[in-house]
Image (cartoon, rainbow, N blue to C red):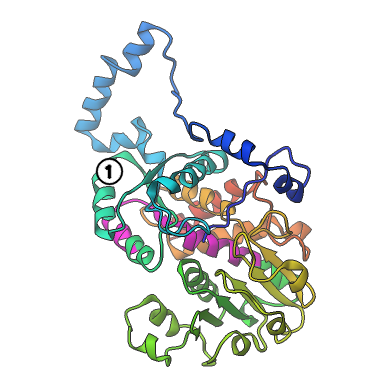
Amino acid sequence: MSTETIIPADSTSPAEAVAVLSDEEIFASHEGGKLSISSTVPLASKRDLSIAYTPGVAQVSRAIHANPELAKTLTWAQRLVVVVSDGTAVLGLGDIGASASLPVMEGKSALFKAFGELDSIPLVLNTTDVDEIVETLVRLRPSFGAVNLEDIAAPRCFDLEEKLIEALDCPVMHDDQHGTAVVVLAALTNAAKVTGRTLDSLRVVVSGAGAAGIAVAEILLTAGIGDVVLLDSRGTISKDRADIAADPASKKAQLAARSNPRGVAGGPGEALLGADVFVGVSSAKLDEEHLKLMNHSSIVFALSNPDPEVLPEVASKYAAVVATGRSDFPNQINNVLAFPGIFRGALDAGARRITPAMKLAAARAIAELAEDDLSADYIVPSPLDPRVAPAVSAAVAAAVEAE
């Protein structure tokens, strides 16, 4: 799941920003692509050429050959993030293929530059074979410093991320999983404060057991929320459910062993009875009758894009805090709050992995930025808040040092 929605900087309000977009404007902005490469050194004279290219560049190449570590400082590779996709789970469009996914990946690379001051290039691959993707990136490893996986369908995304983490000596993160999870935790941390609760007291229902849903459940459990119930199309996920028990190596089975401590069985009605929090990361609609089953002053995060599981005006009848993935409603859960700073902090600190502790640190940093003005309609900072990426980066780098 992706929750990025970019608001034009000159718009007067999120709703107005969405209203003024037209097909002509959108397609014109994508003409020729959204990315370009510019030189960081002058190329205006023969001397400039001799330094930037031959013969001067040969000295740099010889130095790196003698000491490969110099590539980290004498090339851009150490600061370059590749945005990798096979086009199988793009936004809400599904499996549209590599070429059709490229505009999204270009946008992601643009966000890395704008918000994290990191160079980034998209790599879309005409294969859905996990081992082929791993082999491709292993062969390309000298050219980049980190891998952002994007819009890759579950359950292959889990296998791919795990194999890449083992195969590469650099940060790897599937943002659809972990970026979403980090921002959800940040938002829930502050929503709990607004409603007078503590994180460890919450009963949480996560609707959707794909990439985002499983990552959200995992980070909430890691953060100390003990009562997390996950829903998929067959109902609540439990270690006693026959299809889950039959596949003990699956992600769902692994999560079932850690979640649903009360053994809730059934569907949304049974799961939401007495729940404090609903987190929707699927296209499944939430019935208004089920909202009535939740505890007083409940928290509803309806994050499916572009159509939330329940519209905010309906959810607000019963919930004290409502969030969506859209920019035209309050409390947008937007991945851009997390991923630029996470990668920047990891690269600044020379981390080889992005760990759970780094993700928790990122969530805390995002939450803290909204604390001074906390309200039911403001539980996370704006994606355009210039404080966000530096704060997340510093928190992640500090977590690397602590580990």
Q: Which residue is identified by label 1?
A: 140
**Start-end of magenta stretch:** 162-187
Left or right: residue 299 compared with residue 117: right
Seen at 67% across and 46% down, the residue is: 385
Q: Residues within 10 Å of mark 1 (few under 14, many from 20)?
A: few
Q: Residue furthest top?
A: 46
Q: Along the line of sight, which residue is nearer the eye, 90 or 392? A: 90
Left or right: residue 205 compared with residue 374: left
The percent position of residue 248, horizontal first and vertical second, equals 33, 84
The percent position of residue 238, horizontal first and vertical second, equals 46, 88
Tell me if residue 176 is in the magenta stretch: yes
Looking at the image, residue 376 lies above or below residue 391: below
Looking at the image, residue 189 lies above or below residue 103: below
Tell me if residue 360 is in the magenta stretch: no
Looking at the image, residue 108 lies above or below residue 267: above
Left or right: residue 227 compared with residue 215: right
Task: Tally the marks.
Answer: 1
Seen at 44% across and 56% down, the residue is: 151
Res. 240 image quadrant: bottom left
Name the dominant secondary structure of the magenta segment: helix
Q: Along the line of sight, which residue is nearer the eye, 342 or 136? A: 136
The percent position of residue 184, horizontal first and vertical second, equals 59, 65
Q: Along the line of sight, which residue is nearer the eye, 323 or 196? A: 323
